[in-house]
Image (tube, grey):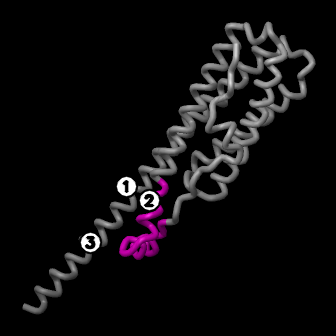
Amino acid sequence: MELIIILVVLIGLGAFVAMLYNRLVRLRNAYKNAFAQIDVQLKRRHDLIPNLVESVRGYMTHERETLTAVIEARNQAESARQQASGQAGEAGAMAELARAEGSLGGVLGRLFALSEAYPDLKASENFQSLQEELTATENRVAYARQAYNDGAMTYNNAVQTVPSNIIAGMFGFQPATMLEFEDREAIQQAPQVSF
């Protein structure tokens, strides 16, 4: 009889551990999926930028330095995006991505501010279309980032609270890092466009 009680307790304990482990796996997969949505939107953003630069190149003949800065920032952001896509939630990858996207947002802001001095550029249908696409993408990035941070917070709560923190420690579940862009104004707010 005692053996049966011990066996039932062990089976119950094993089931409880398995349940907590499976929950942690589901939550980790959820925040990684949410990061994949950010990745898609950032890739879209990065793909739009060369087209934007090409559309303004003919108008901004004296602004080569700004155009070069945009392309360089875009390339750095794309590199950080590629690195982070395989390391969602890891502190170093998230910090580098945030830094690169903040820099990109800053130079894009300069580009849009300079475009105000070029009436022909502002009237260009191609430029307006690209600017609208970029604005829509900025909004999608902000939404996807919020979904990722919500998923990461839910996962972190499970990793850090009792009793699942015991299972997380046993199986090597690490907290996920939130994604906060350094230049929040450039990412969270769509670029101001006036025609």
Residue 63: quarter of image? top right
Q: Earlier in the sequence, mark 2 or mark 1?
A: 1
x and y percent of residue 178 in the render?
57, 54
Q: Which mark is residue 16?
A: 3
Q: Earlier in the sequence, mark 1 or mark 3?
A: 3
Residue 11: quarter of image? bottom left
CB under 8 Å between discs 1 and 3: no
Q: Main secondary structure of the magenta part?
A: helix
In the picture provided, is 18 more to the left or to the right than 27?
Answer: left
Q: Secondary structure at mark 1?
A: helix
In the rendered image, the residue lying farthest to the left is: 1
Which amino acid type is marked by label 1? Arg
**How many residues crowd around disc 1 within 10 Å: few (fewer than 14), some, or many (20 or more)?**
few
Badge 1 is on which residue?
A: 26
**How many residues crowd around disc 3 within 10 Å: few (fewer than 14), some, or many (20 or more)?**
few
Q: Which mark is residue 74?
A: none
Which amino acid type is marked by label 3? Phe
Q: Residue at 75% of width from left, 31% of height from top? A: 109
Question: Which is closer to the viewer, label 2 or label 1?
Answer: 2
Which amino acid type is marked by label 2? Tyr
**How many residues crowd around disc 2 within 10 Å: few (fewer than 14), some, or many (20 or more)?**
many
x and y percent of residue 26 in the render?
37, 55
Q: Secondary structure at mark 3?
A: helix
Q: Which residues are magenta?
A: 152-173
Q: Residue at 62% of width from left, 50% of height from top? A: 180
Inter-mark Cα distance, 1 to 3? 15 Å
Badge 2 is on which residue?
A: 155
Q: Earlier in the sequence, mark 2 or mark 3?
A: 3
Residue 162 counted in the magenta span: yes
Relative to 25, say whether 115 is above or below.
above
